[in-house]
Image: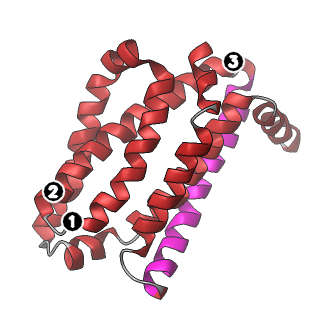
Amino acid sequence: MRQEVREGLSFVLGSPGLRVLCGCILVMNLAGVGAFAVWVLYAREHLGLSEAGFGLFVAAGAVGGIAGSRAYGWLERRVGRTSLLRWGLAVEALTYPALALTTNPLAAGAVMVVFGVHAVVWGTAATTVRQLLIPDRLLGRVGGVYRLADLGGAALGAVLGGLVAEGVGLLAPFWLAAAAVGLLCVISWKPLVITEQL
């Protein structure tokens, strides 16, 4: 098993496209799950939502996800994967300050619809690129490395988000997420062009 893990990691490190995608998902989940770790408190205390209102708020993201899955093929044909990945980072970076700055539940719900579209579109584009870059025999091994960045970032982000919110304030994880993903967007913009060559 160690040999297989080493082989998957070696392939990721040797592929610029996979390196940038793994880095993106790691930072996005560290930042995003850090903010969403305080989701219930954000909805109840910042937006003033009831339990039913919180359910509708969460559902707004799901509605966006359904719309994103239906729109993906059309978007990919018209703007290409590179643009979807690049501009998706920009959308995500803007999501967090938008949520922090509004106390209007309808506005926050609209932001979550857009975020839901982005999450599905970005995830589909990234998965497509990964599958094109990875040889069939290494799909599981390299996919495991990507999932480690994905789920590991989410787990660590949830812990850090809670600690930051407790120590600094409820909205602090949102501002940190905006800064982290904004910086990621700038750093990754040029390297993501490799995805257009597939």
Q: Is residue 198 visible?
A: no
Residue type of the residue flagged with mark 1:
Thr
Q: Which residues are magenta?
A: 138-166
- Residue that appears at 70% across and 37% down: 19
Q: CA distance from mark 2 to mark 1?
A: 7 Å
Q: Nearer the viewer, residue 189 or 133?
A: 189
Whichever of labels 3 and 2 marks the residue nearer the N terminus, that label is 2
* Residue sticking out furthest to the right: 3
Circle 3 Cα neighbour tier, 10 Å, few/some/many (<14 / 14–19 / ≥20): few
**Residue at the spot of label 2:** 107
Work out whether 198 lies above or below 4. above
Q: Secondary structure at mark 3?
A: helix
Q: Do callouts 2 and 1 mark residues in contact (Cβ within 8 Å)?
A: yes
Q: Is residue 43 visible?
A: yes
Residue type of the residue flagged with mark 3:
Asp
Q: Quadrant of residue 193?
A: top right
- Residue that appears at 61% across and 26% down: 130
Q: Nearer the viewer, residue 50 or 83?
A: 83
**Residue at the spot of label 1:** 102
